[in-house]
Amino acid sequence: MSRLPEDPPMAFRAHLFMCTNTRPPGHPWGSCGEKGAQALAEHLKATYKEMGIEDARVSLSGCLGRCDKAPALVIYPEGVWYTVKSPADVEEVLKSHLAKGERVKHLMVPAA
Ligand code: FES
């Protein structure tokens, strides 16, 4: 899907959604929360602020429907999904994808 000429300007160059949903232990779907997503999301927000990026937005979210790829992070408008398992992963995505417009292929999630 592409933008139409009559669409209003985009509010942000990029919008990052990090799932922090937590399900009870033993739930068959698992969750990003039980894999450390809350702490990783806090690191994401702090690092993003430190980088001084003002034309993008980071939002924490409920389940994004990619629980098998937890902890899940998606960046729009590209629609690129990542699994970020460590603070280093978070920093690599921010510095490569968001700041340089590159991709972090070893953390990217293939299409569902
Ligand atoms: S619980 Fe995170 S994507 Fe579903």
Image: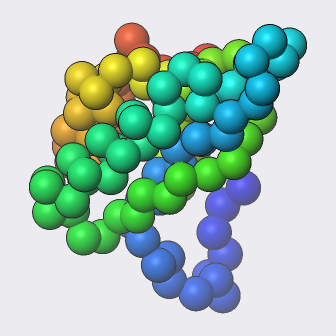
Q: Is residue 81 left or right of residue 4?
A: left
Q: Quadrant of the C terminus?
A: top right
Q: Nearer the viewer, residue 3 or 83?
A: 83
Name the residue: 67% across, 75% down.
Answer: 4
Name the residue: 69% across, 25% down.
Answer: 31
- Quarter holding residue 96: top left
Q: Visible in this render: residue 112? A: no
Q: Nearer the viewer, residue 15 or 49?
A: 49
Give x and y (percent) for residue 80: 53, 36
Give x and y (percent) for residue 43: 30, 41
- Quarter holding residue 87: top left
Q: Is residue 101 left or right of residue 50?
A: right
Give x and y (percent) for residue 106: 39, 12
Give x and y (percent) for residue 62: 69, 48
101 relative to 24, above or below: below
Give the residue at the far right of this rendering: 28
Q: Visible in this render: residue 22? A: yes
Give the residue at the far front of this rendering: 25
Q: Is residue 36 left or right of residue 20?
A: left
Q: How is the image coloured?
A: rainbow
40 relative to 46, above or below: above
Q: Nearer the viewer, residue 47 or 7?
A: 47
Q: Quadrant of the N terminus?
A: bottom right
87 relative to 46, above or below: above
Q: Is residue 15 left or right of residue 99?
A: right
Name the residue: 47% across, 78% down.
Answer: 11
Q: Nearer the viewer, residue 101 or 18?
A: 18
Name the residue: 39% across, 34% down.
Answer: 40
- Quarter holding residue 21: top right
62 relative to 49, above or below: above
Report the number of discs.
0
